[in-house]
Image (spheres, rainbow, N blue to C red):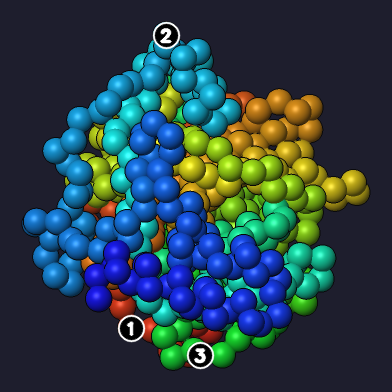
Amino acid sequence: MSNHKMFWAFSALALAATSALAAVSADEVKKLGTTLTAVGAEVDGNADKSIPAYTGGLSTPPAGYQKGSGVRPDPFAAEKPLYSITGANLAQHDAKLTAGARELLKRYPTMRVDVFPSHRTAAYPKSVMENTIKNATAVTTTDGGLGVEGTYAGIPFPIPKTGQEAMWNHLLRYSGHTYTTKYDSINVNASGSAVLATTGEITLQYPYYDPKRTGQSGPKDIFFRAKVAYTAPARRAGEALLLQDYINMQESPRKGWQYLPGQRRVKMSPDLAYDTPNPATAGTSTFDDSYVFSGAMDRYDWKLVGKKEILVPYNAYKLAYAKDPFAVTTPNHLNPDYLRWELHRVWVVEATLKAGKRHIYSKRNFYLDEDSWYALASDQYDARGQLYRAAFMAFTPFYEQPAPGSASQFFYDFATGSYNIIGLLGAYSTGMKFIDAMSEKEWTPDALAGAGVR
């Protein structure tokens, strides 16, 4: 069955799901697979057709893709920008930009946003769509929104009612089960000097989407794992890192371990979370800036603002797979020639720091892609309410799976004038490859020591 036909087949499933105890109304659930996609996006395009209708996403690799390869050719390489935004014409397009993008255009005459035709490329396996429709009537949050209960292996809240529900959709987004890649991360300081921050080999696993899992998740279940071994530069070669996140982050907080060659031992590191500076980005981001947002939500109050049409980095294969990672950087901002921006509908979620809680960001605005639930951008504000930082995630779906996905993230620090980009894959022939699930033994602290020793 084609992805397009499969999408429309889910209307019947949505109707059947309304017989369960609904977390949303029966009429709302009936929209899944009809006027809404199985994951809750609007099927129709926008009024002027600058956002097209959803027809099932991209699940056919383009010419040039080699089966089994982790390197993905750009399906839209021949396309030209529809228009470009600079500081000179910013006022005409202000409403379609995040605060971070606007700030870059205001600050730097060389900054440019090249806007390409929008393609709604996010696609899903049948099982994920089926489980998402089940979740619409089965899932609730627990512990004040810090955990979820009753989730099948799909998006937990396709029709979100709160900011936390929308953010859980991002945390439990689908991007496959297990994959690995070798990547470069580059820091660019205020003077424009670009240096290699890290070269790393990372394996990501989402036990939540284990194909063998058929039931609902429990509060102690791990939904995300990451294991990183750094190979360069010399000062960081041999370091390794292991992170695990749980379905209920109140009951089971994030666990992290580090291996440092100088100490010759693995130690638990509870500070690999929240606003601890990420050393791999020279302090331009925090650990909970990873993937625009990761970790627990307990330090903020969350508000679901609504939907908006925003220009975001989308189908950015040219950036992620650039052969020369340093070519994508220029002083002050990424090289505009390598970045593709498209207009998409996003959910806007506002996070405000709770009274008595500590974090370097007093407020954060997140922009979640309606088709994939990936947080593709965020704006971070300091204690004075001034724009402090901005984060972006460049969407590059895995069309051969199919699965939504992203390789590259980049972070701007407006206080220092520096920035970081992490997840540049093009210098390595491996690209980003799906692999068989690693055993539980390979996710232990003991195994981390073996991965990092030099």
Instruction: Determine crowd level at label 3: few under 14, some 14-19, many 20+ residues with C-alpha closer than 10 A.
Output: few
Q: Residue furthest right?
A: 356
Give me the disc on residue 88: 2
Where 235 sits versus 5, above or below? above
User: Mark 3 — residue?
Assistant: 214
Q: Secondary structure at mark 2?
A: helix
Relative horizontal placement of residue 351, taking residue 408 as reference (left or right): right
Count numbered badges in the picture. Answer: 3
Give the amino acid at mark 1: Asp
Q: What residue appears at the point 54 percent right and 75 percent down from the top-left corner? A: 15
User: Mark 1 — residue?
Assistant: 436
Q: Disc 3 or 2, which lies upstream in sequence?
A: 2
Closer to viewer: mark 1 or mark 3:
3
x, y percent for residue 261? 49, 67
Give the amino acid at mark 3: Thr
x, y percent for residue 212? 44, 91
x, y percent for residue 135? 59, 75
Closer to viewer: mark 3 or mark 2:
3
- Residue 328 shows up from this direction: no
Q: Disc 1 or 3, which lies upstream in sequence?
A: 3
Quarter where residue 414 is shown: top right
Relative horizontal placement of residue 330, taking residue 43 as reference (left or right): left
* Label 3, label 2: how far apart the Cα atoms are: 54 Å
Give the amino acid at mark 2: Ala
